[in-house]
Image (cartoon, rainbow, N blue to C red):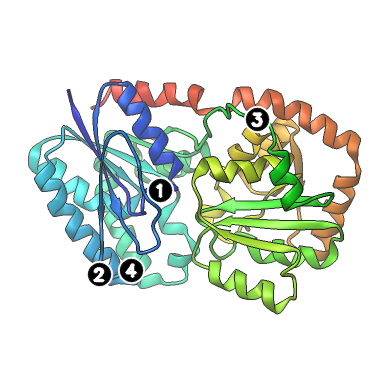
Amino acid sequence: MQRVVVSVINDLVTDQRVKKICGTLQELGYEITLIGRELPESLPLDRNYRTIRMKLVFRKKFLFYAEYNLRLFFKLLSLKGDVYLANDLDTLLPNYLVSKLFSKKLVYDSHELFTEVPELTHRPPIRKVWLNIEKYIFPKLKNVYTVNKSIALFYQKRYQIPVKVIRNIAPKLKNKEIDTDLAKKIKGKKKMLILQGTGINMDRGAEEAINIMKYLDDSILYIIGGGDIFNELKDLVKKTNLTDKVFILNKMPYEELMEYTKIADLGLSLDKGSNLNYEYSLPNKIFDYIQAEIPLFVSNRVEVAQIVNKNQIGYVTQSHDPKTLAKEIRNLLRDQNKISIWKKNLEKASDQYNWEKESKKLKEIFRDLK
């Protein structure tokens, strides 16, 4: 049995992409070892394959990345896999070095345009370090895939190598029945908006989502997940006196999260086009909303807008002004005919966009590793 060592820099619990990929690799007969990190607030992890979560001294900035990459390098040396799967640029260097040392196969899964995120574009010296790592390794890679066509084309143009696409598509939601008790407790007769995700950072529209609620009556907003600005969002809710309309919940197990998603009336995705990473983004939550069969309200980002418009499953806004957004949402929620059409289209979309279909492409990649 071949061994694949999978590396990612998060705490593993809520990373649905990595979880789905590990499950698919198990179906192919691989023995899995998954490496991540453990935080003081990390939830318990229960997987049917080996997991290693490292506790780091540092949690932010340069020292954090330096410590993680150094420890990951020595951990990979001791494990000696047959295939190394690096998730994102912040795990690529140690995986590349170890794969070369042992003459083993390396696979790179780029979850985003790492060097184009606002956290780096606002810090040019740090971005230059990561960009140099990428420029050194990327052209040498033989097995690369990413989350959507726009990012794949970007990398192909920059580095002149083929990049395949494995989208962040959710698995089929087996139980689509709404928990009526939860719905009654959470929203009663009010309309419910939801914004979910583990990467709710700057320029992802969360602040606008909160400010929308100033102008919406008989509605509530749930923000569920985590991110760099999560504490600031909680402070904003208090400052705007919206504690009775906006509820912010920390990361939770996927199955529990989807119980909230199913009872929502509208799923939000409000990324701004302030950088190429967000412009080309196709977040997990888009496919979570599709599986929950709730209409989408999204900003006009390339990949997201294409999915929504092509399948007629929601509304694409051109604005980030909270008052304008609130007016658009109010009108949409009143238009039951349009909501009904979107709901019917969502049933079809949930059959089309699911991991059971998308994973076939992943299996093809791993059956033909170079």
Q: Is residue 162 visible?
A: no
Q: Would you say 159 lies left or right of 294 here?
A: left
Q: Nearer the viewer, residue 122 or 176?
A: 176
- In the rendered structure, find residue 13 and report the number of the disc placed on it: 1
Residue lying farthest to the bottom in this orientation? 239
Task: Tell me the CA gap for discs 4 and 1.
Answer: 17 Å
Q: Which residue is mark 3?
A: 176
Label 4 crowding class (10 Å Cα cut-off): few <14, some 14-19, many 20+?
few
Q: Residue at x 24, y 60 (%)?
A: 68
Residue lying farthest to the front in this orientation? 181
Query: Which amino acid is tagged 1?
Result: Val
Query: Which amino acid is tagged 3?
Result: Lys
Q: Nearer the viewer, residue 314 or 22?
A: 22
Q: Residue at x 51, y 43 (%)?
A: 254
Task: Tell me the CA gap for discs 2 and 4.
Answer: 7 Å
Percent across and percent down for residue 343 are 77, 31
Query: Which amino acid is tagged 4?
Result: Arg
- In the rendered structure, find residue 57 and report the number of the disc placed on it: 2
